[in-house]
Image (spheres, helix red, strand yellow):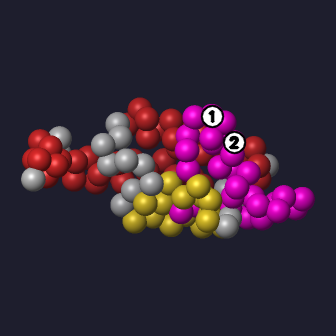
């Protein structure tokens, strides 16, 4: 019960909806990125499928390694970079995650 009260007091559900909107807006340019096959999103759960890069066995893994080296922890599922930010995250931190992700995709896919 204490968790539910805390979530209500912090408007976690409202913040989650807001974060989903911000993610959608910020990731929209990736839909036309040459190295991105598809961006799939449900709320804040996001999968960014990247095109395989010649000479790389695991493109998604390489992107996630660059993100890790820049302070953002995520994981690939094959060539899909998975973003699942905490529902209590603030806009500044979410924008950092997106900036690091886009930069890593640019670095790996050209």
Q: In the displayed structure, would residue 6 be above or below residue 71?
A: below
> For the point 88% across and 61% down, which residue is it?
54
> For the point 53% across and 63% down, which residue is it?
47
Residue located beneath label 1 in the image? 70
Residue located beneath label 2 in the image? 66
Q: Is residue 32 visible?
A: no
- The extreme front residue here reads 1
Disc 1 secondary structure class: loop
- Chain part drawn in magenta: 47-74
> For the point 44% across and 40% down, which residue is it?
94
**Mark 2 neighbour class, 10 Å CA radius: few under 14, some 14 to 19, many 20 or more:** some
Q: Is residue 36 left or right of residue 98?
A: right
> For the point 66% across and 36% down, which residue is it?
69
Disc 2 secondary structure class: helix
Please provide percent x and percent y for residue 106.
71, 46
- The extreme right residue here reads 55
Please provide percent x and percent y for residue 78.
67, 67
* Residue 60 is a magenta residue: yes
Distance between mark 1 and mark 2 Cα atoms? 6 Å
């Amino acid at each position: 019960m204490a968790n539910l009260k805390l979530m209500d007091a912090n408007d976690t559900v409202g913040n989650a909806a807001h974060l989903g909107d911000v993610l959608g807006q910020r990731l929209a340019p990736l839909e036309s990125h040459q190295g991105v096959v598809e961006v799939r999103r449900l709320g804040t759960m996001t999968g960014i499928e990247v095109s395989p890069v010649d000479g790389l066995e695991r493109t998604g893994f390489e992107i996630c390694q660059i993100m890790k080296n820049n302070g953002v922890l995520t994981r690939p599922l094959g060539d899909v970079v998975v973003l699942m930010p905490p529902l209590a995250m603030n806009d500044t931190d979410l924008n950092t995650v997106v900036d690091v992700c886009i930069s890593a995709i640019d670095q790996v896919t050209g």
